Amino acid sequence: MAISVILAHPDPASFNHALARAACDALAGLGWHVHFHDLYGEGFNPLLPAEELGRNARLDPSLARHCDEAAAAQGFVIVHPNWWGMPPAVLAGWVDRVLRPGVAYEFTSGDGGEGVPRGLLAAKAAVILNTSNTAAARETRVFGDPLQRIWKDCIFDLCGVSDVRRRMFETIVTSTPDLRRDWLHEATTLVAQTFGPAA
């Protein structure tokens, strides 16, 4: 029984790294096994080659491990900054290569890919922890909060994960150490409330 924690930020001193560590510690304290991946630290290759497009494509062992972990995970914690209303490219590439047909979703018989897929992930819930330098009110008013649509509606809902909880921490550049400590406590509380003790 494991939770996958996926981190996408290039700076080891970033608040994103602190959030990921706090999430891992909280999960371990609840008895969960944690599959942690620092995508930048691992040098994850985000480029999806043509030979990987097919459902039965041969995958290299490191990618196959990511896929196996994602398929079996009881939940996900995704940690990344808001860059241009999107996840960093390395994380978008992780979605492309890991949440693939046969792992995260499939189309029903007779559907050539034009319909709505059936989700395959075992996960019951996902927590998305984001950071931003855009104030929340402006994000919603001007941009409509695209990360919420991406993670809940465009990714996890289609992969069978309906309980998607997200928290954006902002504004990072003006935040104080005390505020960041409060945010870390809030993040660990959200993770604990979402997943609870491991069965």
Image (spheres, rainbow, N blue to C red):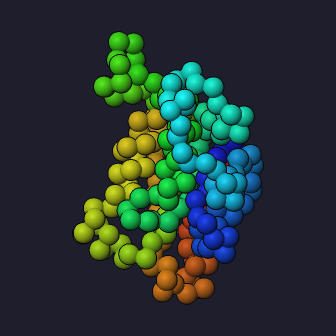
Q: State whether residue 41 is above or below residue 48.
A: below
Left or right of 45 in this view: 169: left
Q: State whether residue 46 is above or below residue 97.
A: below
Q: Is residue 13 visible?
A: yes
Q: Is residue 189 visible?
A: no
- For the residue pair 99 and 71, the one nearer the viewer reads as 99
| Residue farthest toward the top in the current orientation of the protein | 110
Q: Quadrant of residue 155?
A: top left
Task: State the residue at coordinates (41%, 59%).
Answer: 86
Q: State whether residue 188 is above or below residue 173.
A: above
Residue 41 place in picture, x, y as percent: 69, 59
Quadrant into which the C terminus falls: top right
Residue 158 place in picture, x, y as percent: 41, 36
Residue 184 place in picture, x, y as percent: 60, 71
Task: State the residue at coordinates (37%, 62%).
Answer: 85
| Residue farthest toward the front in the current orientation of the protein | 50
Residue 135 place in picture, x, y as percent: 36, 77
